Image (cartoon, grey):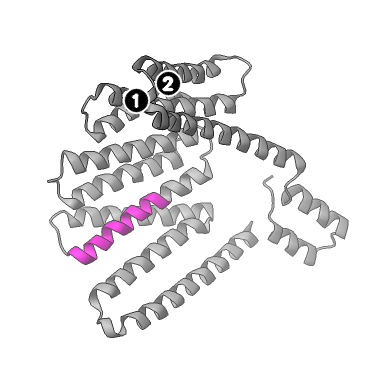
Amino acid sequence: MEKIDRETIGILSQHSNLTEAEVAALLQANCYTNKALWEKFIRLFLLALGVGFSVSGVVFFFAYNWDLLSKFVKLSIILLLLITSIAVILVPKTALLVKKISLTAAAILVGVLFAVYGQIYQTGADAYDFFLAWTVFCTLFVIVGDFAPLWLLYLVLSNTTFGLYMEQAASDWPKFIILFVFLSFNFSALILATYFTKKKPVVWFLYLLALATTGLATFGNAMVIYDGYDAYLPLFVGLTLLVYAFVIWQGWQTKTSFYLALIALSCIVLITTFMIEKMDTDRLFLTLTIFIVLSVTATIKGLLTLQKKWSNEN
């Protein structure tokens, strides 16, 4: 049986013969965070924070002491740290989460290694070459680890690689084709993370993917409003409608107002953009203020009502 939320317990206490002690027990079991959960959270948070600071320390160490280190020392330090991070994974009694965090650190150190190597030998590679190599060589880590932060790093690297490639080597591509590729890639990642993972998807990871995908769609359509028609416009708009339909469907299926809020916010942004582009400047500020206040208020009220309805159904 799934845990019930605070609002449901409040309804039960009003319309049943539950005693005050029984209500308190339900709240303690389903709503309050106990000592064991706090200890687990603090332990994992400090572990992740320590690894993050350690990797950041390595980067800043090279940045501030670059001229004082020999080539051998520079490469030896980063290789030693990389080997140590991988060695932690091979220790049998190491906790699974510690192994995954160590693998994440190793994936980041791969990028540091490429950066150090490129600076030492002045390879002259373009920025997208660096990120492409980093993406390719940490692919195995991502597949083996199957860890949400690792996948997030992988997606950031992939998007960065493509963006830099567009800027440096394919600047003549039509802008809506570029937006279409970006949106297609992230939308595909959202679908795969939602339906084709072996284990239960990580909620915050899905939220970030949905936010990125909806943000790209919103940005592209804002460009449509400002720049007008393009030969590839129908392709991008069609994909945008698919994205909106999927996000709404996902929100309705999971009964999560976050997805619906994304679409509502996207629509508000696009309507506001249209008003800025088409309206007369004299009455623009007042009209925009009224529209934004009313639309945001209506969205919040509608989402709260819908969430309350879903809670009662559960």
Point out the tag, 2 or 1, that comes first from the N-terminus.
2
- Picture layout, residue 16 above or below residue 176: below
User: Magenta segment range?
Assistant: 211-227
Three-letter amino acid code at the position of disc 2: Ile
Instruction: Judge from the rendering whether residue 41 lies leftward or rightward of residue 189; answer left or right.
Output: right
Distance from disc 2 to disc 1, alpha carbons, whole Å, reads 8 Å
Residue located at (50% from left, 53% from top) = 253
Q: Between 313 and 257, which is closer to the camera in this rendering?
A: 257
Is label 2 in a helix, a strand or a loop? helix
Rendered view: 2 above or below 87: below
**What residue is rendered at 27% in x and 60% in y?**
221
Q: In this view, does 310 lie above or below 254?
A: below
Give the position of the C terminus as an image quadrant: bottom right
The residue nearer to you, when weighing 82 against 90, is: 82
Please check the rendered image and state whether residue 218 is part of the magenta-colored stretch, yes or no: yes
Residue that badge 1 annotates: 116
User: In the rendering, at what x and y percent does residue 92 appear?
Assistant: 60, 14
Q: Where is residue 201 in the image (x, y as percent from the top left)?
A: 51, 40
At 47% from the left edge and 49% from the top edge, which residue is drawn? 207
**Which residue in the structure is indicated by mark 2?**
78
The answer to whether marks 2 and 1 mark residues whose Cβ atoms lie closer than 8 Å is yes
